[in-house]
């Protein structure tokens, strides 16, 4: 089975500024997630946090290939996709705190962050649910000839659910401009991928649906960016869907507080040694001559933005009691 | 005066769709065999069906494959896609051929369409109509004959309508398509041939409004979809018994027109709810609880429920007929109250 990019397009070499932008996005995501971990452990808000620390290159690399008006559907582990698509960290943090200023006025929470101004059609609490929704967004794009593309992020676990298979088939027979991006982080909750996945790779399933299946190193933002660029170009050109599998890893457990006893310390260490942010920093320093001080300043800037986001959230009001009944239906905000 | 324009329920559905698709290019129709013979235009074999119940005849010819989309047998896929299309600017009408199939595709309706508006803090609308066929009487047994409208009415965020006749089918489908919320449009299979006067122009019948199908003074019979005609037949028989029965046609299960139901019961003092659905936690129990809770002082007796039994829909014709609420059972329930 070969897993080559569709077509013969090759991404142009990224400029230093482009790579710095990717690096900044990954730093922002990591800072956000680490802040969330701290807040969850402190009991700052209710609910669970599904963190994507370790997987930042996928969200950053894929979303950097998209237009502002392209669509994204996401998962229960969706903070990174939102940030990479340009959703405001303060509004996201306020949503996690359940405040009225949150992206969803405090009624969605971590697993349901959406920002339609940014084409972010929603994280999702139901595994696999975002794939058919992305097909529908792509159908809108196709029928209205808007030139938009839809990206569905999902995990290796979701590749075993019916919605995945129905979506790939539907997207292929309707030739929809959609890119299915699998973040294979090797675990569906506490179950290893090799136990749950009958195929060797998620991408192996693509030929059955007559679409290109591509594997990227999900801990290398440049590889993700290059392969996502080709996949998005393929979809946007009207050539139909692509399945892009990004091999990655989550450093935390399934949720904050999951000690992740289903995997060995050596395994975690090996993946951490290939950390996407470390590698991008190395590349910036060695190949682009970026000074370490500049990278430190970027990391500090991400932390400062988190301070601001948390301050915004904490100073925001909780929703008015009347919000319980507001927006059940669309007619009027009560 | 010109002769009345008579359409069947089926034709009323076609007409509502045709007029809305002409009026608004965002309206699309998708589902299994809504055209039939997909992709075989060149051979002249497309639009072989126009839907399993032939409600969409002529739509493919007029609007083409971009707006009348045959889907694979893939309800989870295309209902989810309909949600995605709805939140990005289209106004899809997605057919679920038999409501019983919801077992393989509930998530896009229950967790996605129903809650997207709420969970986004009102920042996105889901103008999706799911047209589906309900009810027994066609010899297709338990997996193709349920009502299940109560099941959807249970979910906040969904609107549920169940028209009883051609006029209301057209008006409610027009309203459903124009509505910014997801609407479950329930078509009882045995009503498809029902015919009556249907105006030619587009019109909306408001979702959430019941109607008095027959005025009366002694008892209120409440039905929806096919059981409205059951109630009307019972009322006719009761006339010979010297009983003047009022019939309320709910039309919408959610939102429920509580005022029309309660006002009628307050006038008559007696209520019988006739529901083809299962009795537990269903429409009849819901309406009975409404009446008992809000109009208890006006009642001269207990609220009666005439429903299907708590059993799967049986196949054998004799059993199936016994399963469905009949005018005789409705009449007997009324007579017990007097």
Image (cartoon, coloured by chain):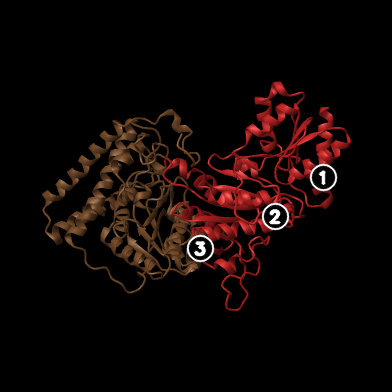
Chain colours: A brown, B red
Helix, strand or loop for disc 3? helix
The chain letter under disc 3 is A
Front-most of A214 and A111?
A: A111
Question: Element under label 2?
Answer: helix
Which picture quadrant has residue A289?
Answer: bottom left
Q: Residue at x 38, y 56 (%)?
A: A71
Query: Compared to B66, does A299 lie above or below?
Result: above
Which quadrant does the N terminus of chain A fall into? bottom left
Residue B322: mark? 1
> Which residue is labeled 3 in the image?
A170
Label 2 packing within 10 angstroms: few (<14), some (14-19), many (20+)? many
Where is mark 2, residue-wise? B9
Residue occupying image coordinates x 68% and y 26% = B292
The chain containing the residue under callout 1 comes to: B
Residue A207: x and y in percent read: 46, 69
Q: Residues within 10 Å of mark 3 (few under 14, many from 20)?
A: many
């Amino acid at each position: 089975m070969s897993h080559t990019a569709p077509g013969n397009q090759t991404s142009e070499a990224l400029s230093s500024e482009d790579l710095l932008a990717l690096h900044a996005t990954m730093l922002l995501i990591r800072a956000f997630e680490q802040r969330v971990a701290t807040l969850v452990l402190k009991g700052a808000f209710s609910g669970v946090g599904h963190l994507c620390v370790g997987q930042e290159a996928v969200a950053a690399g894929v979303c950097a290939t998209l237009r502002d008006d392209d669509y994204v559907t996401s998962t229960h582990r969706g903070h990174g996709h939102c940030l990479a698509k340009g959703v405001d960290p303060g509004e996201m943090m306020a949503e996690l705190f359940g405040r009225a200023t949150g992206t969803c006025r405090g009624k969605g929470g971590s697993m349901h962050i959406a920002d339609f101004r940014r084409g972010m059609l929603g994280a999702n609490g139901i595994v696999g649910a975002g794939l058919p929704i992305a097909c529908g967004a792509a159908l809108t794009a196709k029928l209205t000839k808007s030139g938009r593309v839809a990206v569905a992020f999902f995990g290796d676990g979701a590749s075993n659910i019916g919605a995945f298979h129905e979506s790939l088939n539907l997207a292929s027979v309707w030739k929809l401009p959609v890119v299915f991006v699998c973040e294979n982080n090797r675990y569906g909750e506490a179950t290893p991928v090799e136990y749950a996945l009958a195929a060797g790779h998620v991408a192996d399933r693509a030929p059955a649906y007559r679409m290109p299946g591509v594997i990227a190193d999900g801990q290398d933002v440049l590889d993700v960016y290059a392969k996502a660029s080709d996949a998005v170009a393929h979809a946007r050109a009207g050539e139909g869907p692509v399945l892009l599998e990004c091999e990655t890893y989550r450093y935390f457990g399934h949720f904050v507080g999951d000690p992740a006893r289903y995997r060995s310390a050596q395994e975690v260490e090996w993946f951490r040694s290939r950390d996407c942010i470390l590698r991008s920093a190395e590349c910036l320093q060695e190949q682009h001559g970026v000074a370490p001080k500049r990278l430190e300043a970027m990391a500090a800037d991400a932390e400062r933005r988190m301070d601001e986001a948390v301050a915004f959230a904490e100073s925001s009001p909780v929703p008015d009691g009347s919000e319980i009944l507001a927006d059940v239906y669309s007619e009027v905000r009560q | 005066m010109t002769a009345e324009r008579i359409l069947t329920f089926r034709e009323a559905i076609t007409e509502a769709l045709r007029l809305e698709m002409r009026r608004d290019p965002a309206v699309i129709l998708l589902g299994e065999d809504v055209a039939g013979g997909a992709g075989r235009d060149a051979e002249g074999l497309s639009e072989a069906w126009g839907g399993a119940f032939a409600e969409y005849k002529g739509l493919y010819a007029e609007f083409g494959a971009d707006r009348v989309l045959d889907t694979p047998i893939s309800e989870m896929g295309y209902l989810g896609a309909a949600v995605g299309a709805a939140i990005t600017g289209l106004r899809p009408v997605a057919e679920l051929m038999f409501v019983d199939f919801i077992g393989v595709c509930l998530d896009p309706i229950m967790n996605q369409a129903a809650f997207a508006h709420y969970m986004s803090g009102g920042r996105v609308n889901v103008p999706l109509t799911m047209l589906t066929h309900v009810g027994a009487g066609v010899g297709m047994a338990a997996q193709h004959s349920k009502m299940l409208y109560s099941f959807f009415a249970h979910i906040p965020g969904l609107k549920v309508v169940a028209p009883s006749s051609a006029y209301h089918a057209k008006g409610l489908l027009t309203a459903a398509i124009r509505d910014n919320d997801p609407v479950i449009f329930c078509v009882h299979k045995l009503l498809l041939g029902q015919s009556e006067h249907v105006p030619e122009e587009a019109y909306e019948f408001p979702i959430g409004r019941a109607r008095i199908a027959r005025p009366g003074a002694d008892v209120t019979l409440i039905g929806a979809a096919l059981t409205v005609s059951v109630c009307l037949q019972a009322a006719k028989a009761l006339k010979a018994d010297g009983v003047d029965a009022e019939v309320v046609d709910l039309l919408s299960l959610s939102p429920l027109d509580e005022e029309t139901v309660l006002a009628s019961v307050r006038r008559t003092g007696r209520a019988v709810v006739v529901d083809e659905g299962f009795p537990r936690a269903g429409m009849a129990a819901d309406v009975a609880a409404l009446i008992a809770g809000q109009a208890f002082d006006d009642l001269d007796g207990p609220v009666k429920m005439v429903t299907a039994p708590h059993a799967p829909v049986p196949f054998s014709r004799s059993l199936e007929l016994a399963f469905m609420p009949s005018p005789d059972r409705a009449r007997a329930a009324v007579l017990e109250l007097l």
